[in-house]
Image: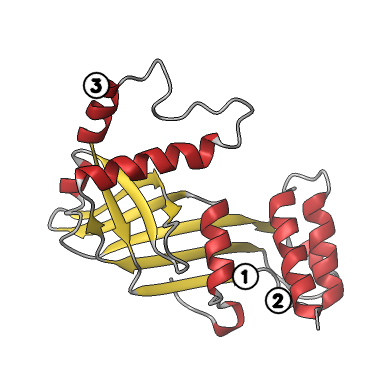
Amino acid sequence: MRQNPSFALADVAELRLLIERNPWVTLVSSTPEGLVASHYAVVLDPERDDLTILGHVGKPDDLIHALGEQELLVVVQGPHGYISPGWYGDVAAVPTWNFISAHLAGVPELLSAEENLRVLEHLVAHFEERMPDPRLMWAPPNDPSYIDRLERGTVGFRLTPARVVAKRKLSQNKPAEVVETVIAELNADGPFANPALAAEMRRAQEARVRP
């Protein structure tokens, strides 16, 4: 992803929030057969305060990606959406797309069976805790034999990125009144309504004016 200083996102706390809110990521590897991409959920390593992520792939995706042997690119995609030139007022303009995205690259560390099992358990708990009646990994009707098969069919990994490129393009290069118009349009009932993107724009706008 080409970086633009005007839209660069480097704050670790903001990047952690992006990963927490958008855990469904794309894994990309370059192989002798060409590029390979897969899609999996990840979580931040609870024992770290950086951008280290934990995840797993189903076999044989570990072999397809040569996981642990070469660099892996993890693409995190936050809220994004179409921005009409009509929202800019009576000025020369073309359509664009507002978005938040991060690319994390590094060679992942493969986890042992015991570590992978803990990560799988943590992953289930991380999402199930929001449910009114959480069903955790070891809860019936799951039994030890089922959990064992689950673990043996997956390969866990930990990735501490060696390179991070992140962008937050939220109309920062537009006048404040234009940003307000775009936010209002995204919150309206039109064909490109996008409240999640509007909320990110509002949060970014408030951060810029905060003393």
Residue type marked 1: Lys
Of circles 1 and 3, the one toward us is: 3
Residue 134 at x, y percent in the picture: 55, 28
The answer for how far apart the CA atoms under marks 1 and 3 are is: 48 Å
- Would residue 90 be visible to someone looking at this image? no
Residue 184 screen position, x and y as percent: 84, 57
| Residue 93 drawn at (x, y percent) | 72, 72
Name the residue rendered at 28%, 44% in the picture. 116
Quadrant for residue 198, please give it: bottom right
Name the residue at 38% across, 45% down: 39
Amino acid on which the number 2 mark rests in the picture: Gln
Residue 169, label in figure: 1
Q: Is residue 52 in view?
A: yes
Q: Nearer the viewer, residue 155 or 62?
A: 155
Please state, as top left, top right, bottom left or bottom right, where the N terminus lies in the image.
bottom left
Q: Are marks 1 and 2 in contact (CB under 8 Å)?
A: yes
Q: Residue 119 appears at what percent x and percent y?
A: 35, 45
Compared with 152, 187 (above or below) is below
Is 112 placed above or below 100 here? above
Label 2 element class:
loop
Residue picked out by circle 3: 145
Q: Mark 1 or 3 closer to N-term?
A: 3
Few, some or many C-alpha atoms within 10 Å of disc 2 (few <14, some 14-19, many ≥20)?
some
For marks 2 and 3, give the CA distance: 53 Å
Residue labelled with disc 2: 172
Query: Where, quadrant-wise, is the C terminus in this rendering?
Result: bottom right
Residue drawn at x 52%, y 39% is 127
